[in-house]
Amino acid sequence: MTTDKTASVSDINFPGPDPYAPLKDLPAFTLTSTDITDGQRLPESVTEPGGGDSPQLAWSDLPEGTKSIAITCFDPDAPTASGYWHWGVFNIPVSVTELPTGAGAENSTALPAEAIQLPGDSLRRGHYGANPPEGHGPHRYMYAVHAVDVDKLDIPEDMPVTVLGFNLYFHSLGRSIITGWFEQ
C-alpha cells in the first residue's frame, strides 16, 4: 500500500489495535512537538536510517500530584504479536517541561542526570527511529508522555521497555500522545 505523504492517521487503515484502549482512561494534558505533527507522516529526522533522532517534546498542565515524567514510543503495527518498543525513558524530574530533539540518543547528555533509558526492542538503550519493514504498509509511532505519581520508578536499567509500560499502568496520573506514521 502506498500512502499519500499528506494523509493523516485517521485516513489510513493500520494493522494493529490501539494499544492504549485496554488501559485505564487517564486525563490528557498539553503535549507539543516542533519535530512531529500529530496524525501526520514522520519526517526523516526521526526515522532509521534517515536520522533516528528522538523528537522534541514539550508538556504542560500536568495533573495534580505528578512527581516525575516517563516517555515511551511504541509501534503497534509491527509484524509481531506484541508490537515494537522504540523508546522508553523515565525518572525525568517534574521540573523538566521539555526534551530537545535528539535527547533520546544513547548516552545522551541532554537528558536529566536522574533519567534512565531502557533498551527497546532494537536492544538500543535510547530512541530507535521509525523503521517498518519495506512493503508492510504504514505503521503508527505513538510518542506518549506519562505523568507519574512517584519521584522514581524502581526499575533496573537492564529491563525492557515492556516492564516500564507495566509499571506505568499502576503509577500514571495522566497521559498524552502524539502519533505519527511512516512506511517504506
Image (tube, helix red, strand yellow):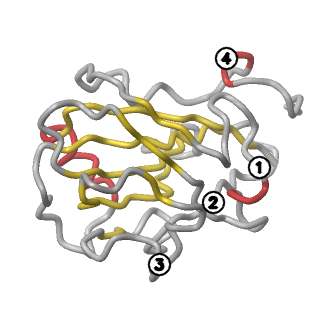
Q: Earlier in the sequence, mark 1 or mark 3?
A: 1
Q: Tell me which numbered mark, 3 or 2, is placed earlier along the sequence.
A: 3
Rounded to the nearest whole Å, what is the CA distance between mark 3 and mark 2?
15 Å
Say whether disc 4 or disc 3 marks the residue closer to the N-terminus. Answer: 4
For the residues carrying marks 3 and 2, which lies nearer the camera in this image? 3
Identify the residue at image location x=57%, y=54%: 56
Question: Which residue appears at 31% of the width and 42% of the height?
Answer: 146
Which residue is labeled 1 in the image?
Answer: 43
Q: Is residue 107 above or below residue 39?
A: below
Q: Which residue is mark 4?
A: 10
Q: Please, what is the three-letter code of the amino acid marked with disc 1?
A: Pro
Tell which of 82 and 24 is nearer to you. 24
Asked which quadrant contains residue 89, the reply is bottom left
Q: Which mark is residue 125?
A: none
User: At x 34% / y 71%, what residue is drawn?
Assistant: 112
Given this view, does label 2 or label 1 mark the residue nearer the observer? 1
